Amino acid sequence: MQHHTLIFNDDFEKHAEQIYETPQWPENPSVYLSCTSQTDPTVAPKGKENLFVLIPVAPGLNDTDAVRQHYFDFSIQRIEETLGINFKNDIIYRRDYSNRDFATDYYAYKGNAYGLANTLMQTAILKPSMFNKKLKKSVIYWSANNPPRTRRATGNYFRSGSSRSDYKKREEKLTH
């Protein structure tokens, strides 16, 4: 298994429709795997792997324990069949993290992990600015924003009382 592995379903258009057009739990989702221990052996015990399994889903869905179990079983079966490995019985630690966790832990609207909206128009360079034109002397920070002249994620908080020039001065100190 590589560090990054994508397992696409047969009909990605339908999966995308179930995320963006008619929000629902996907019937046959694509799966993204991140096996971080492939490039950093310190993230797992010796002889073990650290694997994240991600399924893109729409925000605001009813996230129950039964739904999580269904997608866990689905993902493991898809991975085992596609990669030709059996590992379900070797899992020693499992943590599910989905919409309700993002909503509870980060106050993310509808449990959205991607920021303001889960749309292409708010992805990458199209994300809103950190500076609100209507709120002078304020900076909005979160990891889903585009910081000026840097890609550093700063955390999730709102800081008022700072001007754009104050922020630029702090950034210059950090980058020099």
Image: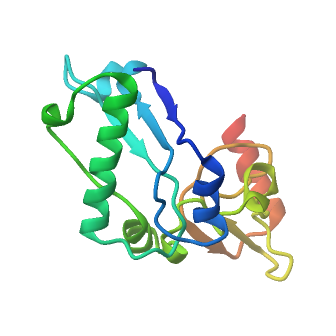
State the image coordinates of residue 127 (x, y, percent, origin top left): 76, 59
Please determine whether, in this image, residue 11 is positioned above or below residue 46: below
Q: Is residue 136 left or right of residue 37?
A: right
Q: Nearer the viewer, residue 137 or 23?
A: 23
For the point 31% across and 29% down, which residue is it? 43
For the point 56% across and 41% down, which residue is it? 10
State the image coordinates of residue 24 (x, y, percent, origin top left): 51, 70
Q: In this view, does 144 lie to the left or right of 135?
A: left
Q: Quadrant of residue 101?
A: bottom left
Considering the image in quadrants, where does the N terminus appear?
A: top left
Looking at the image, the residue that sits furthest to the right is 133
Please determine whether, in this image, residue 162 is positioned above or below residue 39: below
Please determine whether, in this image, residue 87 is positioned above or below residue 64: above
Looking at the image, the residue that sits furthest to the bottom is 134
State the image coordinates of residue 143 (x, y, percent, origin top left): 60, 55
For the point 70% across and 76% down, which residue is it? 161
For the point 64% across and 62% down, which residue is it? 17
State the image coordinates of residue 77 (x, y, percent, origin top left): 30, 39
Q: Which of 174 and 17 is in front in this view?
A: 17
Considering the image in quadrants, where does the C terminus appear?
A: top right
Q: In which quarter of the image is residue 19?
A: bottom right
Please determine whether, in this image, residue 75 is positioned above or below residue 106: above
Q: Nearer the viewer, residue 81 or 176?
A: 81
Q: In this view, does 36 lie to the left or right of 115?
A: left
